[in-house]
């Protein structure tokens, strides 16, 4: 199997290079290898790779910056995703594409299921929804994987920010009325590899169907709860633990509005592929252990 990955230097993309290698040849491209802000270049890249599977882990991911760069975010997350889908279909390959809880407005009382109507609150969510729609319109074999609150031991994310701020401040003010599932990029990549393996077999046997699936860690917490859990487990990564004060969304205004409920129901992923991601607390401990290994000694 030949697998082409866009977004090789991102949190999920970097982990995909490791998780997909046992499946076959992995061609992992960063922005230099293929810039999604130039969609017209994408078909040639895909034709040259001759992939069996394309995984799009690239995108414009700065939620707040997207408020002033919506045209750029829509170009990368929307139009480019559609071009990838069309070129992937032309190669008769499978496309796996990541999306987000931000396609929903967070007003539902319980976890969102895949067929709940989308209603994004911000430009980033609108751009990701445009990408989902473009994939479906392209008509090729595809799987859209929606995930939430992604973090890793590398890159820019909430985990790394909390560890940095904990070394700089005596008190952290963290939003406590937004709920979701912090999801480790490595777990996403491992589950994606399992999904691809099963989907590839299904396509070979004529039993594949395109789908949208939710893929998040089990359990849920608030940003405040996530911050507390990070500091509870940080140990020597944080010499002195700061106080963590719970605040409301209104007390921490941001350019982009966030949904207060980002919980996604992952039953469809479990029922179709037999996959359940670990609880978010378990994954957090494993990620912090990985981060300790990366710390310089001496």
Image (tube, helix red, strand yellow):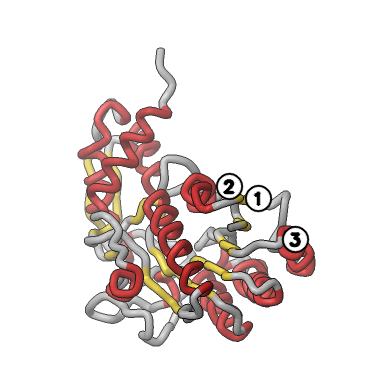
> Along the horizontal axis of the image, is 84 left or right of 11?
right
Whether pointer 1 and pointer 2 mark residues with C-beta atoms closer than 8 Å, the reply is yes
Q: What residue does disc 2 label?
A: 9
Quarter holding the N terminus is bottom right
Q: Find the residue positioned furthest to the front.
A: 205
- Number of marks: 3
Q: CA distance from mark 1 to mark 2?
A: 6 Å
Examine the image and state in which quarter residue 258 appears.
bottom left
Residue 125 on image: x %, y %? 49, 73
SS state under label 2: loop
> Along the horizontal axis of the image, is 92 left or right of 107?
right
Residue drawn at (24%, 47%) of the image: 282
Residue drawn at (29%, 45%) of the image: 284
Please report whichever mark, 1 or 3, sits nearer to the chain's N-terminal start. 1
- Give the mark toward the camera: 1 or 3: 3
Please report whichever mark, 2 or 3, sits nearer to the chain's N-terminal start. 2
Quarter holding the C terminus is top left
Q: What residue does disc 1 label?
A: 30
Please report whichever mark, 1 or 2, sits nearer to the chain's N-terminal start. 2
> Along the horizontal axis of the image, is 287 left or right of 59?
left
Residue 152 on image: x %, y %? 41, 46
Residue drawn at (43%, 21%) of the image: 296
Whether pointer 2 and pointer 3 mark residues with C-beta atoms closer than 8 Å, the reply is no
Q: What residue does disc 3 label?
A: 45
Residue 16 on image: x %, y %? 50, 51
């Amino acid at each position: 199997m030949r697998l082409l990955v866009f977004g090789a230097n991102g949190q999920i993309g970097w982990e995909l290079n490791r998780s997909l290698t046992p499946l076959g040849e992995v061609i992992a491209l960063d922005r230099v290898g293929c810039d999604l802000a130039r969609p017209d270049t994408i078909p040639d890249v895909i034709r040259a790779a001759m992939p069996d599977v394309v995984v799009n882990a690239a995108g414009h991911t700065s939620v707040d910056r997207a408020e002033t760069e919506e045209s750029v975010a829509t170009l990368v997350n929307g139009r480019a995703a559609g071009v990838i889908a069309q070129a992937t279909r032309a190669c008769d390959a499978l496309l796996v594409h990541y999306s987000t809880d931000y396609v929903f407005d967070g007003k539902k009382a319980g976890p969102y299921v895949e067929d709940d109507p989308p209603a994004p609150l911000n430009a980033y969510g609108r751009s990701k929804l445009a990408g989902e729609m473009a994939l479906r319109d392209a008509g090729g074999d595809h799987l859209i994987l929606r995930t939430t609150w992604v973090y890793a031991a590398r890159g820019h994310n909430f985990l790394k920010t909390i560890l940095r701020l904990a070394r700089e401040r005596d008190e952290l003010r963290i939003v406590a009325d937004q709920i979701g599932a912090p999801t480790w990029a490595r777990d996403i990549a491992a589950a994606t590899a399992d999904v691809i393996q099963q989907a590839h077999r299904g396509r070979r046997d004529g039993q594949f169907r395109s789908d949208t699936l939710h893929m998040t860690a089990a359990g849920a917490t608030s940003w405040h709860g996530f911050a507390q859990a990070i500091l509870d487990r940080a140990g020597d990564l944080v010499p002195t633990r700061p106080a963590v004060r719970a605040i409301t969304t209104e007390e921490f205004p941001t350019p982009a509005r966030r949904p207060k409920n980002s919980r996604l129901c992952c039953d469809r992923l479990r029922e179709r592929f037999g996959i359940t991601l670990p609880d978010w607390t378990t994954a957090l401990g494993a990620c912090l252990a990985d981060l300790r290994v990366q710390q310089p000694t001496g």
